[in-house]
Image (cartoon, helix red, strand yellow):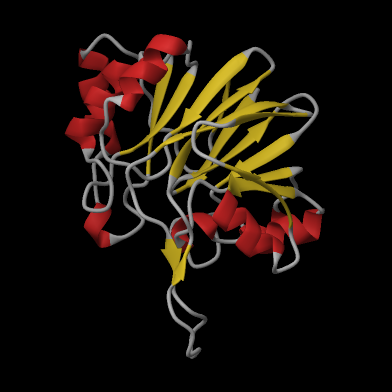
Amino acid sequence: MKITYLSHSCFLLETSTHTLIIDPFLTGNPLAQVKADSIRCDYVLVTHGHFDHVGDALDIAKRNGATIISSYEVADWLSRQGAKAHPMGLGGGFDFPFGRIKLTIAFHSAGYPPPEGGNGGFVYLGVAAGMLIQAEGKTIYHAGDTALNLEMQLLGQRNKIDVAMLPIGDNFTMGPEDAVTAAEFLKAGLVLPMHYNTFEPIKQDPKAFVAKVTAKGLRAQAPAIGETITI
């Protein structure tokens, strides 16, 4: 399986048969190096309903005929706009052609403002989630946006996680110190930081985070934007 970091919380996962993109915030993202219209994929995974995670999900899904996988509220909202979508709920799992996804608890919010210049109210989009993705014998945990929580300890006890993607930006999510504790809870084979440096309030030093995780006897890496890791 190949994992390519596309910036912020966006990753491209390539199995031998399918391609998945997670939280495709590319348009309007100052760090993104690829355009949304260059993405080819079969599934679009959205952890929660904030602009920097929904991002280009609708356009990518419609252009590729891809299926969006997200919480019930986000999936329903995007399907009403013309996308194919598979809704899920926290704690629920489902077997897809590429493998299995389970939605995990994330302590965060979800909602969308009305269109620019519109008069509608804020759109409530359910709860935020993380995703446990199992494919080709590997287990990937994308935490989404979240605070540190003890549920991560349970995830680490019940799953052999090969790669954990953890937010470190602070301000809106857990910061580096809490993310180090999360890494200890999860006991993942490899920890990748995400959700940092895109905006001023979430400026962080990913190399310092990697050093702190490494000091705990765990393996971590801060991939460059566009870098691909094979697991």
Query: In the picture shown, does residue 163 fall above or below 26?
Result: above
Q: Is residue 173 visible?
A: yes
Residue 57 in picture, x, y percent from top left = 63, 57
Q: Quadrant of residue 62?
A: bottom right
Q: Quadrant of residue 147?
A: top left
Quadrant into which the N terminus falls: top right
Query: For this rendering, which residue is in front, 35 or 112?
Result: 112
Query: In the picture shown, does residue 195 fall above or below 191?
Result: below
Residue 140 lies left or right of residue 110; in this view the side is right
Residue 175 lies left or right of residue 139; in this view the side is left
Residue 32 in picture, x, y percent from top left = 50, 55
Q: Residue at x 29, y 18 (%)?
A: 185
Q: Residue at x 69, y 16 (%)?
A: 136
Residue 49 in picture, x, y percent from top left = 48, 58
Q: Is residue 211 visible?
A: no
Quadrant into which the C terminus falls: top right
Q: Residue at x 43, y 42 (%)?
A: 144
Query: For this rendering, which residue is in front, 53 or 101?
Result: 101
Residue 101 in picture, x, y percent from top left = 61, 30
